[in-house]
Amino acid sequence: MKKVLIGLLLIIPMAIVAAVVLVTNVVLITPDITVASVAIVDPDFYQDVDNVSLYFDRPGMQYQLAALVLPKKATNKKVHWSIENSVSYDPEYEGDIATVDDNGNVTINWTGTFDIVAKTDDGGKIDRCRFEIKSDVARSAYIVYKDVKLGETPGIDITTDEIIRLEACAHPIDVDLEYVTWESSDKNVLSVDANGVVVPQGAGTATVTMKLKSKDFVSGSEKRVAPEIVRTVQITVRGGVFPTALKYVHTDSISLSSIGAEGSTLVKSQNATLESGAIVFSGKTGYAVLEKGGKTMTLRKVESENSIVFENADVIENSTVIVGKVPYKLNAIFAASGEKASGARYYSSNTDVATIDEKTGLITAISSGEVTFTAEFGEEIISIDLRVRKPVIYFMLEKDAPQGIADECIYGNMYFEYSGEEMTGRLVPVRQIKVVAPEDLTGSENLSRFKWSVVSDGDIATIDENGVITFSEFEKGVRKNVKVTAEAKDSPYAGDSIKREYNFTVMYGVNVETADELTKAVNEEIDGKKYEVFLRNDITIRSIRYTEADTSGISGEKGEETRTWCNAPLRLSTSLYGNGHTIDWKHRDYDDPTAKPNIMGSNILVMEGPQGKDAPRVLLRNVKIKSSELPKSNTFASKDFVGIGVETKGNVHVQYCVIENAMYCMRVGSYDNEEEAIKKGDFAETLIEGTIMSNSSKFTCFSWCTYKNQRVVMKNCVYGQAASPSVGFSSGDDNEEHTCNLDIQGILRIYNWKQDVDLDLVGGITNNDAIDNILKEVIQKGLQGKRYEHLFVKDSGVRYMHCGMLFSGLNHENRVTVTGALEENGFDHVEIKLNELVAEISPGAAIIVGNLKPVTFYGYTDESKTPVKHNSNLVHSQELYKLLRGE
């Protein structure tokens, strides 16, 4: 008996020494590195390219771009190139103004604007580069009447009591015009002035001819002479109710019969009355508007027959002159005769806004503003007010960038209110729609230059003159579609409306853009209640570390931490929509991402769902959770990470998420249920759907299973590299009522193959290094026997084992059942009797490890039944995301 005891005493230290040796034999794991960002750059110097402005030279001209994907060692750096927001400067052009190939090479076919979009295959991260392809000279032109471009053989019918205005339109719309002229073929039928105002003179038909020429194009030594473009319109004048629409008078009284206005009534006047069939003026100037049969005629009183007026001032007063487009010309005439007041001189009140040729009256518009022009003839001075505006050739509204596994972008209907830079804590149901290009239109002072309108499901949205949307109350959890339309008030030409639309989806909840906003929205009640949360940016949480791991043996700076069970800086009891953005963590005292505290990481988020089969779920959707930073070596070991990405309790739904770089990416909790787990049907307290987890220093998805009738569903999930099996469910006590059912639905892919020398099926589950390493050694050696040979595949003499799922209790009976699509996903299983392995490999270790229960192991043993081969890597891609969404 003494000999046996002495032998055991000798064996125990030897086993412990062996375990310590194993601890120092650190296995480095190559992680699955996901994409963080993409930038469009030039291919030579890799400088950011936000916008490109070129003059159109010829169809087929090219421009090369490149994409910079970070981090540089990302597993999948593939980029998809596309074109969005394509608008030609020539509305007649029907083809693609540009195309882009798979290598970022842009081919330009015509003038206009467009966005080149680079979207990563992994994560759907997006960058944009805006192109503006400027035109050289005008190639076509139109006569516009009532905002409609007239066709090839246009005709217009008017009556003698109508004054109309024709306008010119040139394409492409971005060229600057040198001149526009108008001419009538028969001045006895109608006259047309320099601004296209047509005044009937008598019944008949006449042709109006417009001649237009854009400025010659000069670039370096190259010059292109713009052609003169001629367009005509035939106008037929018929007799009207009145003989004319406008008449100037210089007498104090005039009878209606003398001007063909018998039977008319006075509807508007200044210093004028209707008395005994005559209009009587009481001042030196004034006007009278007569109406009959739905038509009107205006009488204007001037001081004398030699008084001057601006030709057709009634039509052009307060008009808008567009810089670089159709020029305006003022003409002073004698009111009585209509003859030109030769020798009149013209002046501008603001030459920074517009100048006017002193002799000819030709206006040159310079910049936006208000201006008064005067004409002087002898001692008489007249004036007219005009507006000058720079044209909106194009503009772009903000555009959503759907990303993440869900490939979506959802807004909340509320934002946090701020007073200066301080958050008040109140919520406001408004959203400012932004103009993002060109730069001179992006300021808030320019928002009134657009006509805004909105259409929404259930009429939940209204919009003001500055593009500010106000949302009304609507039901929680329901998606509403909103369409905003903005139309430029200052389009280049009357016939070309410059409009843009922006569509987005909104739900009832609060948008968060900063860590402070996220923390408040998740952890606190606002106005006495919790709101659903919508991420608008990537957000980094800065705090002390939350962990339950024993970090005492970890060398290097660890930073302040709290040893805690199931606690984190974010405690989510409402739903969070991530929109593909990332929530990561850095220690509040360490900025360097590669500092030891940031590599160790922290718990980040606890999901606190309600209890009960009929209780609603807490939803975590389309967000990336990153608990730790990778070391500089871009490899990690089983002791590197100490944080848990997501912990769950109660009814929760983790959907379309990416969780990575953690001790456990997810640890699943539950609550006691009376209904047997395996009989719950479609109900599961924990539903994990369409989610990817990878890079865990223990198990990727783990549960202690210390609840009555716990049920977990994994639907369309993918797991990547882990130091241990990717899925580990362990019976944590001897209570026979504590059971768990894991149900596999849809696809389940696990990219976690190990060489036989790297196997670690236990994953540090005992939190005792000596015991863990004894078990690791026993399992490594024990699995080398023929009994378990079918678990391995061989390649060039190296054996690989798939570390898929482990269900155990170690010192407790395994009370976890696994159901669902196991065979369909290529999984085989085996029961490993640890006691037998210990007895075979290291009999003396039994005193240390105790009486171990069998464990059940699931993995791929036949590579022909699974797409996950031993040399496969987990690659995030749009194709994979479609599978995860069940498409």
Image (cartoon, helix red, strand yellow):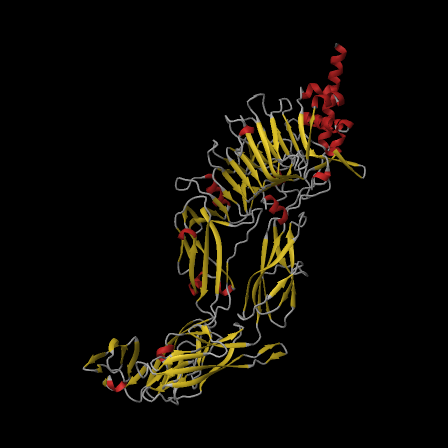
Does residue 575 appear left or right of residue 319 in this picture? right
In the image, residue 116 lies at what x, y percent? 59, 60
In the image, residue 302 lies at what x, y percent? 28, 84
The answer to whether one can see residue 12 in this image is no
Q: Residue at x 39, y 47 (%)?
A: 473
Q: Residue furthest top?
A: 1
Q: Quadrant of the N terminus?
A: top right
Q: Residue furthest left?
A: 276
In the figure, 88 relative to 123: above or below?
A: below
In the figure, 564 relative to 517: above or below?
A: above
Q: Residue at x 64, y 78 (%)?
A: 221
The residue closer to the viewer here, 817 or 271, is: 817
In the image, residue 102 lies at what x, y percent? 66, 58
In the image, residue 549 lies at what x, y percent? 60, 31
Does residue 767 appear left or right of residue 196 in this picture? right
The answer to whether one can see residue 673 in this image is yes
* Snapshot quadrant of residue 829: top right
The residue closer to the viewer here, 159 or 250, is: 159
In the figure, 504 relative to 18: above or below?
A: below
